[in-house]
Image (cartoon, grey):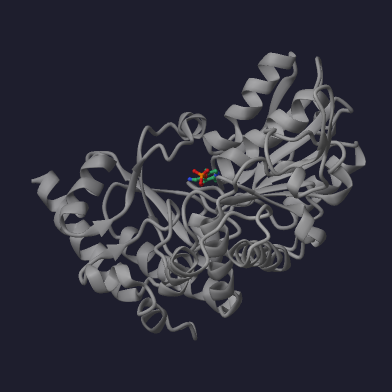
């Protein structure tokens, strides 16, 4: 049993007061929000709403100060420097940012981008587009469908044409897809051949503490809304040594040191990369979410979600005809989500039926259609946990799933 008190934490989430019977098992899509985070956003609008980095009146100074404090908190959380933290709309924008502002000029004809077969469309389509536009290649690290882990490729895979390795820390369908130490080895390999590494941390950062310096990534993308923060904001981490090699993604106000009719000098990072009025309230909200997460012991949190996964798997594995997508042994040791399907009941029927019982789970291809073709499924049900979920949630889910299956099988 874990030491984690999810029932206590749950009281911080007003959605569960407003919807008493809600069983929310869709946190990999977006997490619920604690009142502390909501209050930070309300306070901003009610007490010091103003634009940032412009006006020197008191409100302007306050909002700039809170906005930059949020950046500092986020930087500290990931062991980065504040100027390495760029605010974006979220993971999708962060990855498109790197594709457009770095890869367009650095991944050229005949070069290649390495990714995996499990990627979310957000960490695959921007690379496919760049590869097509620049006549570069897209190479995939394959997934072993026996153990749902990334296969080690031959040495010849890592030729000098590889310019970028863009991979997920955690899959939104399979959970952990890396063999022990494999991600670190791939990062070392990439660096030894001069390739840059982008980590899609949108599913990893909410559950595991990431130290960008230890992990040695060049770019990292994540979304605040998957880790208690608001929608509309995420982070692109760009390693300091690359700041001069990355172009501004957008140009406009706020990011200019000096401009004439013919020329322009950008400010330094992060401002060079944040054109226009940024998502101020959202950044402050994300900072408050980070404050909340700073009070969480991530080892206990991990034990907690793993415990929930074990209760869930014990129940699921009793159901005839069920197929679990993902490495069950790994999920039982350290998991936070489980995907499954039944041959005779469609995933959308299951999630729709459960939705009527006030249980939120996700069904579909989870924006990873290429992976679905590798696994030969078109749809699965995903149950994902966060720090407010309790064993009772899992029990209710299993009871209602049983009812759902009986309904469709009769
Ligand atoms: N990558 C992964 C692994 C994801 O799970 C998601 C969100 N489902 C994304 C990228 C895209 O995140 P967002 O929609 O917040 O940009």
Judged from this view, the residue extending furthest toward the left is 410
Residue 86: x %, y % from top left: 69, 50
Locate residue 214: give its quadrant. Answer: bottom right
Q: Is residue 390 above or below residue 182?
A: below
* 234, 163: nearer the viewer: 234
Q: Residue 105: x percent and y percent?
A: 81, 24
Task: Mark yes or no: residue 329 visible.
Answer: no
**24 or 282, which lies in front?**
282
Q: Residue at x 29, y 60 (%)?
A: 318
Q: Position of residue 144 (x, y in %)?
A: 60, 40
- Residue shown at 48% from the left, 75% from the top: 304
> In terms of depth relative to the viewer, which is nearer, 327 or 292?
292
Location of residue 103 with respect to 397 vertically, above or below: above
Residue 217 in sight in this render: yes
Residue in view at x 51 percent, y 34 percent: 371
Q: Toward the viewer: 36 or 365?
A: 36
């Amino acid at each position: 049993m874990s030491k984690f008190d999810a029932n206590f934490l749950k009281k911080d989430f007003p959605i569960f007061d407003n919807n008493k019977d809600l069983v929310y098992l869709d946190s990999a899509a977006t997490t619920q929000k604690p009142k502390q985070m909501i209050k930070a956003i309300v306070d901003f609008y009610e007490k010091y709403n103003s634009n940032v980095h412009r006006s020197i009146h008191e409100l302007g100074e306050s909002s700039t100060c809170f906005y930059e404090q949020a950046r500092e908190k986020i930087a500290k959380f990931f062991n980065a420097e504040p100027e390495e933290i760029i605010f974006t709309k979220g993971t999708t924008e962060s990855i498109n940012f790197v594709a457009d502002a770095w890869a367009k000029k650095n991944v050229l004809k005949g070069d290649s981008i390495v990714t995996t077969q499990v990627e979310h469309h957000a960490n695959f389509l921007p690379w496919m587009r760049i590869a097509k536009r620049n006549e570069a290649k897209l190479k995939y690290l394959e997934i072993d469908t026996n153990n749902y882990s990334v296969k080690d490729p031959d040495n010849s895979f890592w030729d000098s044409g590889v310019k970028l390795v863009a991979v997920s820390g955690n899959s939104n369908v399979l959970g952990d897809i890396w063999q022990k130490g494999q991600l670190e080895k791939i990062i070392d390999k990439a660096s030894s051949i001069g390739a840059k590494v982008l980590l899609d941390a949108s599913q990893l950062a909410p559950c595991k503490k990431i130290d960008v310096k230890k992990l040695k990534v060049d770019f990292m993308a994540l979304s605040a809304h998957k880790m208690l923060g608001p929608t509309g904001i995420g982070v692109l981490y760009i390693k300091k040594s690359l700041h001069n090699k990355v172009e501004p993604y957008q140009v406009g106000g706020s990011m200019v040191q000096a401009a004439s009719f013919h020329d322009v000098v950008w400010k330094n990072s992060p401002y060079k990369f944040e054109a226009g009025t940024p998502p101020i309230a959202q950044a402050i909200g994300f900072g408050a979410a980070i404050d909340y997460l700073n009070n969480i012991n991530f080892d206990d949190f991990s034990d907690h979600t793993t415990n929930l996964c074990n209760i869930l798997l014990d129940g699921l594995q009793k159901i005839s005809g069920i197929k679990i997508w993902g490495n069950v042994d790994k999920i039982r040791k350290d998991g936070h989500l489980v995907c499954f399907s039944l041959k005779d009941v469609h995933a959308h029927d299951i999630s729709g039926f459960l939705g009527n019982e006030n249980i939120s789970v996700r069904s579909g291809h989870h924006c990873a259609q290429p992976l679905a073709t590798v696994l030969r499924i078109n749809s699965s049900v995903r149950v994902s946990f966060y720090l407010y979920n309790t064993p009772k949630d899992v029990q209710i889910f299993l009871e209602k799933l049983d009812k759902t299956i009986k309904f469709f099988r009769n």
